[in-house]
Amino acid sequence: MDSSLIYAKTPAGGEAVRQSTRVVQRNLRMVLLQVDGTLSVEQLVTKIGNQRLVESALQELEEGGFIEVVAEPARPRADESATGAATTTVIEFSAISQFSTFGPHSAVPSPDMAGGAATSGLSVFSRSLPPFLVDDRVADSVADQRPLPPIRRIALGRWLFGGVIGALLLLLAVLLFYPYDNFRPGLEAELSRQLAMPVRIGEVRLALLPRPRLLLNDVTIGADDAGRIASLAIASPHLLLGADGRVLPEVEASGVRLTASRLVELPLFGGAAVGERNYPVQLLRVAGATIALGDLASPEWSGEIHLQADGRVDKAHFRAADDSLHVEATPTAQGVALAIDSVRWNPEGMPFAFDALQASGVLQKNRLSLQGIDASFLGGRLHGNGALDWSAGMAMTGEASLARLDSHRTTTALAPNLKLEGELNGTVRLRATGSGWQDMLGHIEADLDAQVARGLLTGIDLGELARQGSSSAVVQAGSTRFEMLRARLDIAPGRVVARAINLDAGLMTASGRATVEAGGQVEGKVTVQARSSVTNVRVSARLSGVLPSMILTVTTN
């Protein structure tokens, strides 16, 4: 580079001096500050003391448009007074203080500084810098430094939002992967204390949706297989982390399978106080529960059990899945008192449904007793009592009064081969035993005192027998209309015996007995008597045939 060249700042160079962000490399900025339009390259080298640094910096500054070559020295501009230049130089010089703070400072001004106003602030560079400050290694180190990247400012709201999201994700991970099975021994001990029998839990885990719940899965109640709960869901599980005695507002039990005996043994239904409980429950919800009465399973129940402070049931209400049966349960010293209300309930294995039924009862370990049964079925009403016992197989007893039953619907349901119409009234006493529920239904025995009013008996024509008298040997089929038909029926498996049959059809009456076998075979005797103002006819006949068609064969006695 020509050492006689003189450089001056361009407008961009002057702006770079005022704004330190335009030229930030220290070697370039140091040379740019010294370029004033009067100093030649040689003078700049002498002043700074490093030829390579000066020439390299001048070349880069010229290429960047910060300086330009001038033909002759330029006069300082009016706005660049000596005072202003000194101030700027001192400020920029302080920015590179590593070049200006070596060696002790004298308290006495130097001769160069004593010149007063005649000496400008630039006079500090009138002497060459010490060689150890600007030797090649220092210069290279300065030249190699790069501008620092600008600081990125992040909005406080975004920072806070990101922090909250991160905390939530961390909390979610902790909740999902925490080893909740560590709580199992303590939960088993607490449930065993509350239920007064051993309780085992298969799995403990946390469910977050639709709301946080602690799930106890595959819960076994008792040492045998008489009580199982598929899942116990504890709402507000954080309460378990607090001190003993905190109330759990709600627990839901789903997939419950209990025998009636195990249900009655539970303290909450047994009428006995549970005693001290670490975490008392206020409300127990039940879903998909069945109670086994021997081998008979109840309908699936759902409902709510409200508990008192001592752990006993305050009130409990259950309903069948199809809403056909509702039961309210209350613990007593004798067992669980039941209030039953049903609409369109069809008991398992029965050929008819109850249009409506109300009853009260008591559930005990191996027995269900029902009193005050009031039922609407088969077009009429039934009032009675009954009991079911499963201590050894299955056994059933009951008695009831019948009022205004539809004989057609009744015979269609219970004796389809018998064609009988009219209004059925009477009393019935029944009993049955068997190894199980279905076996018991196949061995029902009953005594029925029946009265059928204003009816029609199809398959036999007693009026024709009275009209023909002994002149006809056989009368087949037909029908008989009557005002009242009374009979005592002894019902046993495979056989029905009708005794003390009395039929009143006004001017004609009939009496007799008959036996009906399982296949519909009929055997019996009947005597018909017809009265009129001129004659009195009495005819006896043997009854035979297969229901519904019967044959009357006249006999001589």
Image (tube, rainbow, N blue to C red):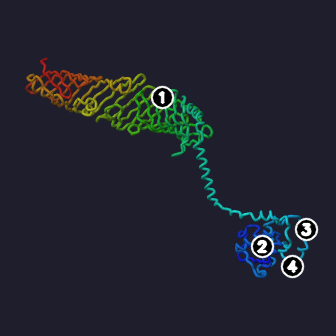
Residue positioned 23% across, 23% down in the render: 516
**47 lies left or right of 371:** right
User: Which residue type carries mark 3?
Assistant: Ala
Q: Quadrant of residue 523?
A: top left
Say whether marks 4 and 3 touch (CB < 8 Å).
Answer: no
- For label 2, the SS is helix
Mark found first going from the N terminus, 2 or 3: 2
Q: Which residue is mark 1?
A: 226
Q: Amino acid at mark 2?
A: Leu
Name the front one of labels 2 and 3.
2
Residue type at the position of mark 4: Ala
Residue that carries the numbered disc 3 in the rendered image = 107
Residue 94 coordinates in the image, percent (x, y): 80, 67
Q: Which numbered disc, 4 or 2, marks the residue that appears first in the sequence?
A: 2
Which residue was labeled with disc 4? Answer: 118
Which is nearer the N-term, disc 4 or disc 3?
3
- Whole-number angstrom distance, CA of label 3 to CA of label 1: 103 Å
Q: Position of residue 311 (x, y in %)?
A: 54, 34
Q: Amino acid at mark 1?
A: Ala
